[in-house]
Image: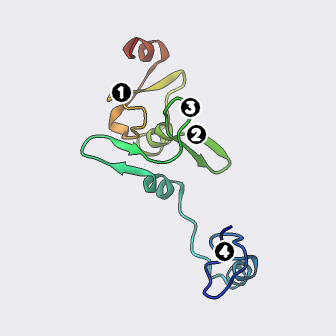
Amino acid sequence: MKRCSEPECARPHYARGWCNLHYGHRRRRGLLPPRPTPLDRFVDKVQFTDTCWLWIAAQNGLGYGQLWVGEKGMAAHRYSYEALVGPIPEGLTLDHLCRVTICVNPDHLEAVAMRENILRGFG
């Protein structure tokens, strides 16, 4: 069980590293650090290489990265493209040009029709 990060406090962790008592004190006094933005959280889960940006956090059963944005779970490569390039056009899907499913480098993603994505794939 996680414990409060306050020195000499043995109470169980409640939120953002503190027990209910210490978290409440900080919240009421306006001393909580700002929450990281979704983009900050995204960048913390990427290993940058010379070519690919490798997702090092949760993956789905097909080998694609997954993350939570607000209350919604989404594919990490889709978040990367939408956050750094723009919206994915209606009716299109993203193709990994590098063929590395955990790559989230937007330069390695291209919005194409599903048929085109399948024809480019292995098999």
Residue 29: percent from the left, percent from the top?
Answer: 68, 85
Q: In this view, does 111 lie above or below 21?
A: above
The crowding category of the residue bearing disc 4, from other C-alpha atoms within 10 Å (few below 14, some 14 to 19, many at least 20), is: some
Tell me the CA gap for discs 3 and 4: 32 Å
Query: In front here: 19 or 109?
Result: 19
Q: Which of marks 1 and 3 is nearer the N terminus?
A: 3
Residue 97: percent from the left, percent from the top?
Answer: 33, 27
- The residue where tag 3 is placed is 61
- Quarter of the picture holding the N terminus: bottom right
Q: Which amino acid does label 2 sit on?
A: Met
* In front: label 2 or label 1: 1
The crowding category of the residue bearing disc 1, from other C-alpha atoms within 10 Å (few below 14, some 14 to 19, many at least 20), is: few
Tell me the CA gap for discs 2 and 3: 13 Å
- The residue where tag 1 is placed is 99
- The residue where tag 2 is placed is 74
- The residue where tag 4 is placed is 3
Q: Which amino acid does label 4 sit on?
A: Arg
* In front: label 1 or label 3: 3
Q: What residue type is labelled 1?
A: Arg
Element on which disc 1 rests: loop
Q: Which residue is drawn at 49% across and 33% down?
A: 63
Q: Earlier in the sequence, mark 3 or mark 4?
A: 4
Residue 79: percent from the left, percent from the top?
Answer: 50, 42
Q: Are marks 1 and 3 in contact (CB under 8 Å)?
A: no
